[in-house]
Amino acid sequence: MRIVFMGTPDFAVPSLRILHEHEYEIASVVTAPDKPRGRGLTVSATPVKEFALKHKLAVLQPENVKDPSFVSKISSLQPDLIVVVAFRILPKEVFAIPRKGSFNLHASLLPKYRGAAPVNWAIINGEAETGVTTFFLQEKVDTGSVILQARVRIGPDETAGELHDRLAEIGAEIVLQTVRLIELEKVQVRPQDDSHATPAPKIFKDNCRIEWGKKAHDVHNFVRGLSPTPCAWTVHGYTMLRIFRTGLSKTEFDSHKELPGEVLAVDKASLHVNTGSGVIAVLELQQEGKKRLRVEEFLRGYTVRVGDRFE
């Protein structure tokens, strides 16, 4: 079975790898164009392209997936199936080409968390469970009929980055199972119930500022749901601090008289901040322009005092 694989970030690599390891014919790998990445803005390839080149797979990097020349190229490859993992929205002219259809791997239990940031929003909203879904593509994004799902428990302190990596590997197994079912013509799909749909829109830096007036567990979920990227942040004086990891404080404080965001305790190894209800222990953070550090390392070179405010 000839497969065209479409994906760009690290999340897509395990799925491409597992198909390659099981010797499926990859007619071409489609990924985003090379672009400046990292602090030095060095022009570099996507993780998917790097894997493809290492394993001598053909690569396409369209600027515009609606371009007639790209549509024609995919058609000329005569794929039996298109597999999409963390790529762009495809027009019907492309996803309708394969005779066995096109399916996508999505990092949620659809119809929950449709959109660009399902992992982040599941944690921010305090979900105890999420998962991955494969579904056939339709014109409306993330709405196609479900093929397979796998459920995953979310740890109480697990970050979005940690969950992302777990889901990438679990998702790869589901991709392989989905391809096998399609190949054997044993797929049984079920439609999504739109009444249970929830959004997971893209998250921007301006939306990542911590609201200390919320309850401690909501602040904790917000921080871990944005870690390591795009990352929750706060302001201390005139300095922006990025906060990567927190915990619910186990120390007893009489905090109801203090303001949200107020530092209640600080020593060489701990930093406790008041919220609207409860106290947060800050565990990993970063001063703008500096390295990400554990709190005990951070406090060796940065001064925070009891009574200071995070805003």
Image (cartoon, rainbow, N blue to C red):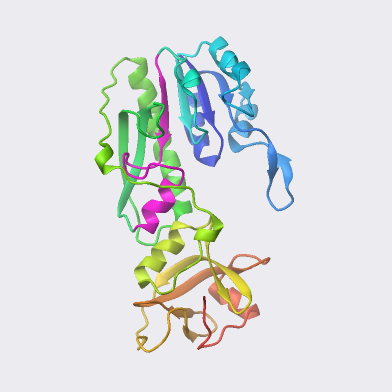
**Residue 13 position (above or below residue 4):** below
Which residue occupies the foreground of this view, 231 or 152?
231
Range drawn in magenta: 100-125
Viewed as shown, does residue 199 lie left or right of 19?
A: left
Going 42% across and 12% down the picture, which residue do you hit?
Answer: 99
Q: Where is the N terminus found, in terms of image quarters?
A: top left
Residue 114 on the magenta segment: yes
Q: Position of residue 149 (x, y in %)?
A: 31, 35
Going 40% across and 66% down the picture, which residue do you hit?
Answer: 220
Which residue occupies the foreground of this view, 124 or 50?
124
Q: Position of residue 102 (x, y in %)?
A: 42, 22
The number of discs equals 0
- Residue 18 visible: no
Q: Position of residue 23 (x, y in %)?
A: 49, 20
Viewed as shown, does residue 170 lie left or right of 194?
A: right
**Residue 167 position (above or below residue 186):** below
Viewed as shown, does residue 240 lie left or right of 255?
A: right
- Residue 121 visible: yes
Which residue occupies the foreground of this view, 229 or 114?
114
Residue 285 on the magenta segment: no
Q: Position of residue 88 (x, y in %)?
A: 52, 33
**Residue 165 position (above or below residue 70):** below
**Residue 192 position (above or below residue 286):** above
Which residue occupies the foreground of this view, 8 or 93?
93
